[in-house]
Image (cartoon, helix red, strand yellow):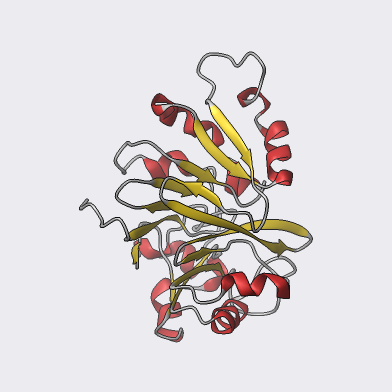
């Protein structure tokens, strides 16, 4: 892996699938039976790196598997979007990274409270040996948090009735599990180089997720230079066929894909 210039940022998609992943257990549809690696989607997670900083957005139940092929190095931050299992189910797998010291985990108030119930042993007064050493930071929307040389701006979107944290990191805007965004948030979303946003499938509206059409409309609305769609379920169809239908600046992301962000 070549080192990047300080101003360069690299995004690696660790997982691009919805809550059950693709293929879905027991399903015999075309997408689930596809032999194309682009159609195999682990649960949503991403790695953001510069020459000196490394952070992960969401640690789902596939986190261990996602990190195994990558160089074993310190994680400077873990950014959580919301408490749903497909986004936090791998918290315990942060254990190995505690060799480098406490892992800084950032989450909004609701997610932080949820973690206390999901993995209470990580935050116990007398933590048992082997439990991950996590330092939990509660983020507030619109208050910049600093991770080494990077400014990270948390924003709020809606996943049905659940508030979810999106993150803007320089030219990158990462949004997952959004069905709606308040008008007041849109100013924080404009002029991004790279938008990553959820698109569950084509077809009728969904109560808590965007469809592909919703995602394309959102990308157009904020004027993103390039857009990658994530959190896709098997109903979206085959990767190659979907990309052939999309505008050139909007692509279906795939697991393992790397994108340089200027």
> Which x, y percent locates residue 136?
61, 35
> Which x, y percent locates residue 101?
44, 26
Q: Nearer the viewer, residue 91 or 124?
A: 124
Q: Can residue 254 be seen here?
A: yes
- Residue under the point 65% across and 30% down: 119
Q: Is residue 96 above or below residue 14?
A: above
211 vs 163, left or right, is: left
Tell me the quarter of the image containing the C terminus.
bottom left
Q: Is residue 220 above or below residue 201?
A: below
- Residue under the point 41% across and 50% down: 149
Q: Is residue 146 above or below residue 235?
A: above
- Residue under the point 71% across and 72% down: 184
> Which x, y percent locates residue 32?
48, 62
Q: Nearer the viewer, residue 63 or 73?
A: 73
Please identify the residue farthest to the right as the structure is shown.
Answer: 161
- Residue under the point 40% across and 25% down: 99
> Which x, y percent locates residue 58?
54, 48
Name the quadrant containing residue 222. bottom right
142 vs 247, left or right, is: right
Q: Is residue 134 above or below residue 246?
A: above
Q: Can residue 90 be seen here?
A: no
């Amino acid at each position: 892996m070549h080192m990047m210039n300080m101003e360069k940022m690299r995004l690696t998609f660790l997982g691009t699938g919805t809550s059950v992943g693709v293929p879905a257990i027991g399903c015999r549809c075309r997408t689930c039976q596809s032999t194309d690696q682009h159609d195999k989607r682990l649960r949503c997670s991403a790695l953001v790196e510069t020459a000196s900083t490394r952070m992960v957005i969401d640690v789902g139940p596939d986190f261990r598997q996602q990190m195994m092929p990558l160089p074993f190095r310190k994680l400077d931050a873990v950014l959580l979007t919301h408490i749903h299992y497909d986004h936090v189910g791998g918290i315990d797998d942060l254990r190995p990274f505690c060799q480098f010291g406490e892992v800084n985990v950032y989450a909004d108030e609701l997610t932080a409270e949820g973690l206390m119930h999901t993995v209470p042993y990580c935050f116990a007064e007398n933590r048992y040996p082997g439990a991950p050493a996590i330092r939990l930071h509660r983020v507030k929307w619109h208050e910049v948090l600093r991770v080494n040389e990077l400014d990270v701006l948390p924003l709020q979107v809606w996943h049905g009735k659940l508030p979810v944290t999106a993150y803007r990191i320089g030219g990158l805007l990462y949004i997952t599990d959004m069905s709606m965004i308040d008008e007041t948030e849109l100013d924080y979303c404009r002029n991004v180089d790279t938008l990553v946003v959820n698109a569950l499938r084509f077809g009728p509206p969904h109560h808590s997720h965007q469809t592909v059409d919703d995602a394309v409309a959102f990308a157009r609305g904020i004027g993103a230079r390039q857009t990658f769609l994530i959190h896709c379920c098997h109903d979206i169809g085959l990767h190659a066929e979907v990309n052939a239908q999309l505008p050139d600046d909007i692509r279906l992301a795939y697991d393992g894909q790397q994108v340089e962000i200027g």
